[in-house]
Amino acid sequence: MATQVVMPKLSPTMEEGQLARWLKKEGDKVSMGEPLAEIDTDKATMEMQALSNGVLRKILINEGESAPLGQPIAIIGEPDEDISELLKTASTPKPEKAAQAPKSMPESDAATPVEVEPQEAEAPEATQPISSDGQKSRTDGRFLISPIAARMASEAGIDFKTVQGSGPGGRIVKRDIESAIGDQKKTAATKPAVGRISIPRPAREGVVYGPSAYRDEPVSEMRRTIARRLVTSLGPVPHFFLTIEIDMERAADMRHSLNELYPDLKLSINDLIIKVVAVSLIQHPEVNASFQDKTIRYYEHADIGVAVATENGLITPVVRAAELKPITEVATEVRALAERARARKLKPEEYTGATFSISNLGMFGIEEFTAVINPPEGGILAVGAMARKPVVREDRIEIRQTMRVTMSCDHRVIDGATGARFLQTFKQIMENPVYLFLDQ
Amino acid sequence: MSSQPTERNTRPKNSPAGSAGVLDRPEEPAAQLDEDRDTLVKVFHQMLLLRRFEEKCAESYSLGKIGGFCHLYIGQEAVGVGAISVLRPDDYVLTSYREHGQAIAKGISPEAVMAELYGKAGGCSRGKGGSMHLFDADVNFLGGHAIVGGQIPLATGVAFACKYKETDQVTLCFFGEAAVNQGAFHESLNMAQLWKLPCIYICENNMYGMGTSLERAMSSQNVASKACAYELASESVDGMDVLKMREATRRAIKRAREESSPTLIEARTYRYMGHSMSDPGKYRTRAEIEKYQERDPIKVFTKTLKDNGILSDSEIAEIEAQVKEEVERAVRFADESPLPDPKELYTDIYANPIN
Amino acid sequence: MPVMTMRDALNLALKEELARDSSVFLMGEEVAEYQGAYKVTRGLLQEFGPKRVIDTPITELGFAGLGVGAAMAGLRPIIEFMTFNFSILATDQIINSAAKMRYMSGGQFKIPIVFRGPGGSAYQVSSQHSQALESWYAYFPGLKVVMPSTPADAKGLLKSSIRDDDPVIFIEQERMYGMKGEVSEDADFTIPLGVAEVKREGTDATIIARSLMVPIALQAAEQLEKEGISCEVIDPRTIRPFDINTIVESVKKTNRAVVAEESHPFASVGAEISAEIAEHAFDYLDAPVKRISGADVPMPYAKNLEQLAIPDVARIVAAVKEVSYV
């Protein structure tokens, strides 16, 4: 019977081994005890011996490649034996953890009538290719997770994509989330103050987005009272304003780098701001919302209105689902929209129905200003000029590029703290825009 | 002995093909007209009503007001009216899917029948049964049943219940001659005679099971003789003669009510229309139909009534006018009756619903 | 409470209901003189006479239809099939007449009839006498389907079925007639139709079993308990209408479900239960619902093959472990 040859443990501390040299080639006869390959461990180069008789049917890793302990690296069998099953399972790396997982059936199960009801220990999904990053449960971009595990993860705020599944085919099951919740509690103290940021997965190319989908939720009694009183005080859209200063060094660097890569793109800081606002809105859906008298409408996508000054006045073309679009696409789209705006060629659906707007007067050297909300949007971000300024960093005065933004909020939907948290996320990403490129 | 076969079912076993029809019967003496005038007029009125009602159904069907299957009774009126007219109101009737006429004869109003055919809430089955499933518990009309022969064991059970409860009600069960080939027929006749149940089985032999003629479907075409195997009383009757139907049914009722004993009556008749409205009738000739129409039950009975001075032409015209108005009234009622409430979809499934 | 066999519990139920209501009568093959092919009707002829306890010819379609007609005319028939395998001959009357009469008459008739008899596998009676037909009958609106798993349930459920105004298919398991248990002798003791019972409480996995599979599931639960897996065993008792709530509540707690049934797997009651769990408890599942069914083959005669065709403790244990990922 054919057997898999796995990466052996050749030193007490060895976790993976690199295949230095195969001493047999596919098709060679091997007998038990015969040297098969040389393996570089963390300590030395060791000879690895065959543990069965037969023919070296298949070499699974090439010379120079590494494999964790227990991963199949070759198959030994009879010359004409069908090894397709072994090949399939061999493509699943078997990290040590899986080996420690509770073993399957006790002896008594061997007596069960397998002809009648084959045990599906090797579920079909177990044979699917698995990405090399060691996330077992991820197959072809899909995650295997049981419904209860998914729900528990979401309730506990755990990103299940970071959890190793212990079920069949790496399915994440209840106990995996339970142990992740345990871990989360342990590490809670060391977590950064700012919440985890998850960047929406980029859209597929060529997808055209219409106005964002939304859900309406009834306005609570309390919120109705807040709305009524604020309107009495401040007019139909009761604004309030929040200002924050952003360190723009990295953003400027990134813009510079991107423009080096894509000289035709002419990426502006504003393009970057649009993208970051969109991503931040998705993190804070309560800001991506509008007051609808009896309900509050929460939008699924961030459709960003970008104020453009034209000879005839202000117009705000809309970048739909900006959170899903790569920064390069945002830049291209804004450019096209602005040109069409100045040529007065925008169609109504291109400049209505934004969920949030951005107004940038930085190019005029305006350091800081307040913008007026375009109803029924819940807010607008007024962006000032980027300027080199002395700032205190780690108790030293440094010259840094900074930028001040002021968000106008519709107080009927957005409360002070809500807006502040949104700006906090915005600042966090803006000051470290590499977040945008983290694929989860 | 009532349980013995009567003389009439001793026809030669292998009668020539096509000889089982009503036209092949030997000349018989005319039925006695010893009924009172009111009864005869009522019977005539009802036969005419059934004929006009069915003609209206054909029209409504072609207008799309009646859906599904629609099996008409035209030509067979003497059987249903004759048999049912001698029942007591508390006697039971169960029948097949060709039952509009029998339902009206048993006392369901033409309005309720037409509304049922229209699928309306005012129908006798509240729009849930349709043409093949007319029911009215109030007049002991226990349904049209649409699986050939399915009503025969049911009727046997109703008769069983009457005997069990020691009432003297009888149960009349109609079915076509094609049902005679079903096991249900034979199983029922066996039980009925074994347990002496007050059930009257009336086979309406109209010569065709859908498009298949009797001689193509039955090895021995003498339906009445099927009773011999179970030692059941039986007779074969001219089903185009309403008076003979009344006489034969009376004999069977007496046997059922007084001796709690079943009877099989073969009523030889003919349907003029197709099996259903969607039947092109290619399996028989126009000439054959016309031959039978000479013996049309309404025509025959009209002549008898006129010859005996019971009805004049003007009186007949008056009855025609009444019948026309009754049918019009039924159509108006059906038209005006509302559709069943959508909530009705989920009612009447269980008598004791759970959850 | 006295201990008695399921056979005697059923007999007691019949006796009490025949005594309680003169419109109840019992009809079937060998129910009277012979005292019942399985002795369920023992003594009833002697007690109630030939009017109420009636031997029939072998004419299943006929007496099933007769029963429905009698029910339409106000009686409460109990129709015994010597085994449910023979009910196949009567399905026209059960399905086309009993199940639909109330609906197609616009609610004018009730059909208070019980069709009862043994079903499922027996001991080496081969293909035509070893069939679990509950999914057939449960398919039809208008019918109720009941399957007891203990003597007490048998008595309480049969009495409720006889008193119910709708047609009830009451399937007894042929192998279980000799099973013993405590049964109330109270003539008013009944068990409502449509209510599942938790036969054993547990926290880690829910086993849904009916009829013969209930004692087998309980044995499996016993064995799993020793291995640290706590199983809840639920017997729906009534297949239609089905008490899905009790099962959903259990699955919400255990996150895992195994359905054990004697019938063939395709379009079975277990398939329906699985679908219902997926529909109503999807967000609580930690593993796909696992079904353990009878083999998808006609029942073989040879003893060893027959054993392989019927789910046993080991298969249920393995299934529970599979859904528990151990």
Image (cartoon, coloured by chain):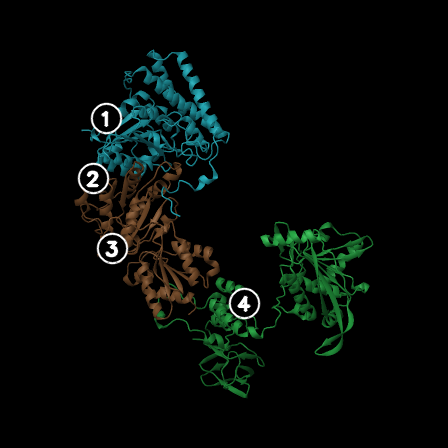
Question: Residue C63: image x %, image y %?
Answer: 27, 41
Residue position for label 2: C51
Residue B254 badge: 1
Residue position for label 3: C183
Question: Residue A440: image x %, image y %?
Answer: 61, 68
User: Quadrant where the N terminus of chain B lies?
Assistant: top left
Q: Dot 3 falls on which chain?
A: C
Alpha carbon separation for disc pair 3 and 4: 52 Å
Residue drawn at the location 51% of the way across and 62% of the way down: A151
Residue drawn at the location 32% of the way across and 12% of the way down: B308
Shown in brown, the chain is: C
**Mark 1 secondary-structure assignment:** helix
> Which corner quadrant of the image does residue B25 belong to?
top left
Do marks 3 and 4 share a chain? no
Nearer to us of marks 4 and 2 is 4
The hue of chain B in the figure is cyan
The amino acid type, in three-letter code, at marker 1 is Lys
The answer to whether the residues at label 3 and label 2 have Cβ atoms under 8 Å apart is: no
Residue position for label 4: A160
